Image (spheres, rainbow, N blue to C red):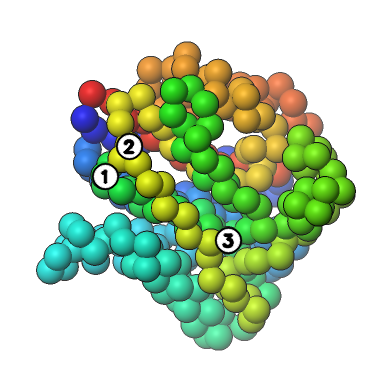
Amino acid sequence: MKILVNSLCKQGGRDYNQDYVAYDATEKDACLVVCDGLGSYVGSEVASRLCATKIVETYKLVKESTDGLTRAFLPDVVKAYVQTAHNYVVGFKEQNPTIRSSCTTVAAVVTNLNGTVIAHIGDTRAYIIRDGKILFQTRDHSLARAAVDMGQIPLAQIRNHKDQNKLTRVLGSDYYIAPDCEIIPESLRPGDGIVICSDGFWEYVYDEEMEVDFLTSSTPSEYIARMEGRLLQRVNKHNDNYSVIAAMVVD
């Protein structure tokens, strides 16, 4: 049994790309990270890059340490990866005041097949797929998601809601709130999948389509290509940056 991983990170219709993806993967374990810098804040492309790369770097350091093959996948340690990235982004901003307002979302999945931990801030999403169905999905930290929780709108309308991009939690700001940290209680098994994507991706690729395309794809690269095809049929020329990491567990 092993993990296959592929990714995509594109500018879309924007002047530059504020998304960033980073990962470290072997056949038996992986750290997968997608970040989306907030477009209205100068330098957020820097915040997203620093966050993603620092999480993966910290994961690798822990994994290579004494007892690292166990510690690297513990929930508190995964949360610490995100805290370390936040501290790093804040420190960098203090040395570079021209980007003092920059911040980013983040979703990180860390797995050794036996255990999987998901930490996220903002509206970059992580999904776990099993038997062709979404087994788990992160909850956005946004006003639109709050409207869903209060029963004001159905979940299906979140993509087009006026407050979809108004976030209640981000990384790198003065008002840092620790990430939600979810533990997938079951071991991953052949046929399972992981998808992590920015809002510029999931706005145009619907959950049921993620499920269908997963079942009809044999590799992560084929899976991503199918989903991107759907996205490109729906976007206009001013669409957001879009990014995705897809992983499949195979025999």
User: Which residue is depicted at the point 37% across and 62% down?
Assistant: 75
Please give left or right for residue 100 compared with residue 25 in the image.
Answer: right
In the image, farthest residue toward the left: 66
The mark tally for this picture is 3
Sequence-first disc among 3 and 2: 3
Q: Residues within 10 Å of mark 3 (few under 14, many from 20)?
A: many
Question: Can you say whether 65 is above or below 10 in the image?
Answer: below
The N terminus appears in which quarter of the rendering? Answer: top left
Residue 188 is labelled as 2
Give the residue type that dot 2 points to: Leu
Q: What residue sits 14% from the left and 65% below the top?
A: 67
Q: In x, y percent, where is residue 127?
A: 51, 40
The answer to whether one can see residue 43 in this image is: no
- Which of the two discs, 1 and 2, labels the residue nearer the N terminus? 1
Q: Which quadrant of the figure has residue 27?
A: top left
Residue linked to disc 1: 114
| Residue 229 in the image, given as x and y percentages of width and height | 61, 21
Report, in whole angstroms, how far the alpha carbon at label 3 lies from the one at label 2. 23 Å
Q: Are marks 1 and 2 in contact (CB under 8 Å)?
A: yes
What is the x, y in percent for residue 222? 44, 21
Residue under label 3, please give it. 121
In three-dimensional space, the C-alpha distance between marks 1 and 3, rounded to whole angstroms, equals: 24 Å
